[in-house]
């Protein structure tokens, strides 16, 4: 299968260079004795990503899903995991621009193609990077 993202990235990275970001995969939750839940993440690893602003089409799509806090989209060469409120799972974390961002929605997820595009929101009180 052809990785179309890799081909497109040759052109897009000329205008908006790829950057190294930190990546932490969501690893589940633990429940404290008082009943509070704490999200757990795998250790941070560096990955190369293409970070872009959200366009009107993406903002409109996310608004229709009642997701209004996303500010950027991230392209990576693997499958991201987003927040899933029904399954009660958290989203992966990415670290760039001096902040921690949570993957809130998968805008494009091509499991067999080796890449995905996720909408991310900046975390105010986030797990340490």
Image (tube, grey):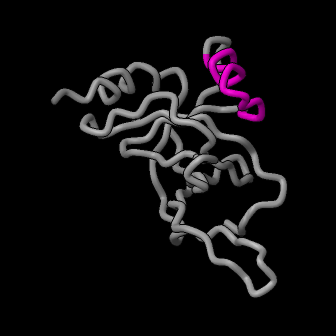
**Residue 104: % across, % down:** 63, 41
Considering only vertical position in the picture, is 12 above or below 88?
above
62 vs 123, left or right, is left
The residue most toward the top is: 56
**Residue 102: % across, % down:** 65, 49
Q: Quadrant of residue 100?
A: bottom right
Q: Is residue 68 visible?
A: yes
The quadrant of the picture occupied by the C terminus is: bottom right
Give the residue drawn at x 46%, y 46%: 80
Residues 90 and 96: in front is: 90
Give the residue drawn at x 39%, y 26%: 9
123 vs 107, left or right, is right
Q: Which residues are magenta?
A: 58-70
Considering only vertical position in the picture, is 29 above or below 116?
below
Give the residue drawn at x 52%, y 72%: 43
96 vs 1, left or right, is right
**Residue 123: % across, % down:** 77, 51
Residues 58 and 46: in front is: 58
Residues 77 and 36: in front is: 36
The quadrant of the picture occupied by the N terminus is: top left
Queried whether the magenta region covers residue 85, the answer comes back as: no
Considering only vertical position in the picture, is 127 above or below 58?
below
Queried whether the magenta region covers residue 61, the answer comes back as: yes
Q: Quadrant of residue 24?
A: bottom right
Residues 37 and 7: in front is: 37
Give the residue drawn at x 77%, y 35%: 69
């Amino acid at each position: 299968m052809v990785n179309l993202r890799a081909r497109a990235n040759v052109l897009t990275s000329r205008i908006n260079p790829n950057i190294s970001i930190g990546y932490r995969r969501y690893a589940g939750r633990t429940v404290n004795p008082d009943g509070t839940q704490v999200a757990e993440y795998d250790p941070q690893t560096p990955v190369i990503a293409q970070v872009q602003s959200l366009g009107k089409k993406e903002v409109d799509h996310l608004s229709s899903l009642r997701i209004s806090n996303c500010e950027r989209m991230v392209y990576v060469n693997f499958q991201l995991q987003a927040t899933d409120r029904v399954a009660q799972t958290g989203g992966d974390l990415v670290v760039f621009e001096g902040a921690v961002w949570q993957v809130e929605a998968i805008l494009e997820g091509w499991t067999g193609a080796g890449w995905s595009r996720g909408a991310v929101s900046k975390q105010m009180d986030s797990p340490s990077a």
